Image: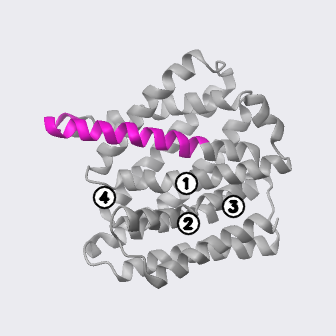
Amino acid sequence: MSDWVIGIAGTPEGARTASALALAAAFLHAIFGALQKGRHDPWLSRAAIDLSYGLIALPVALFVVPWPEPELWLALFGAMAIHIAYKVAQALTYVRGAYTVVYPVVRGSGPLFAVIAAGFVFGERYNPLQWVGILLLVGGIFGLAGYNRLRLVVGRETLGPALAWALVTGGMVAVYTTYDAWGIRLAADPFTFLAWFFVLDAIFMPLWSMRRLMRLARHEIGPLAVRGVVGACVALGSFGAIMLATRIDEVGRVAVLRETSTVFAALVGWLILGEKVGPVRTGLMALIAAGAVVVEFAA
């Protein structure tokens, strides 16, 4: 599998595979965000998810994939620090703001920052039509956030700080996307980076949330554990897919495709949370999808 991933990098097959991985990551990330914004405190949800995927990844890291090269350890610890900052910003965002408003802001700012960062770090360049697609997608996402904000009834008093934190979180999405792409390309075996990333990334949030976890009522432990395991499986698929996609193809392009997660998030809100979509949201989601199509086929 590792040889196949490395072999298709930079090829037409690799581009198609990366697109499929990015869209899968988008769908899974929408579910992942909803899981963190559910009935439990977002800090507790994230702690349960992180602990679960660390335990799942540990035997793979120890017994399946090759041991990391010495220089890869530094890259892994760097990724750990960046993801800690991202998680803190994300939790502060979800605590303060309505999911349907702050999630699009995070996902709308993230790809724009990521495209710019990938240009500096990897020398990626996009033609004018691709930039039109990027702006269509980002504009549709921010339009969705603005529309949801106008319809918001509860939580307006904390929306300002929530939106500020959402922009910070979007910036951190771009940082970790670019850095993880560099890290996984540094590894001789991409699955070594993935396995050890999930092991190390699982440490911080359970420790940070220890006091909250200790105050849990006994009847809350079971549901939180189930949420943690389900969320872990979703996270492994989502983050694993996007990291492999950035190893195979252009970082900016797959980052943009991943942000179709906003469309999937709206569908999750409609199908699971009982939210109405309506013609305006439908049009904005179509604009997001159109932007992604332009970016994909204008290369």
Residue range in magenta is 213-240
Q: Are marks 2 and 1 in contact (CB under 8 Å)?
A: yes
Q: Disc 4 to disc 3, how far (Cα)? A: 28 Å
The three-letter amino acid code for the residue at tag 3 is: Val
Label 2 neighbour load within 10 Å: few <14, some 14-19, many 20+: many
**Residue 214 appears at what percent x and percent y?**
19, 34
List the residue tagged with mark 3: 115
Front-most of residues 36 and 85: 36
**Residue 101 appears at what percent x and percent y?**
40, 70
* Residue placed furthest toward the right: 11
* Residue placed furthest toward the front: 271
List the residue tagged with mark 2: 109
The secondary structure that dominates the magenta segment is: helix
Q: Are marks 3 and 2 in contact (CB under 8 Å)?
A: no
Q: Are marks 3 and 1 in contact (CB under 8 Å)?
A: no
Q: Is 117 included in the stretch rendered in magenta?
A: no
**Residue 92 appears at what percent x and percent y?**
35, 56
List the residue tagged with mark 4: 95
Image disc number at residue 173: 1
Residue placed at 85% from the left, 51% from the top?
A: 12
Name the quadrant of the C terminus: bottom right
Nearer-N-terminus badge (2/1): 2
Nearer-N-terminus badge (3/2): 2
Q: Is there any visible trace of residue 167 in the rendered image?
A: no
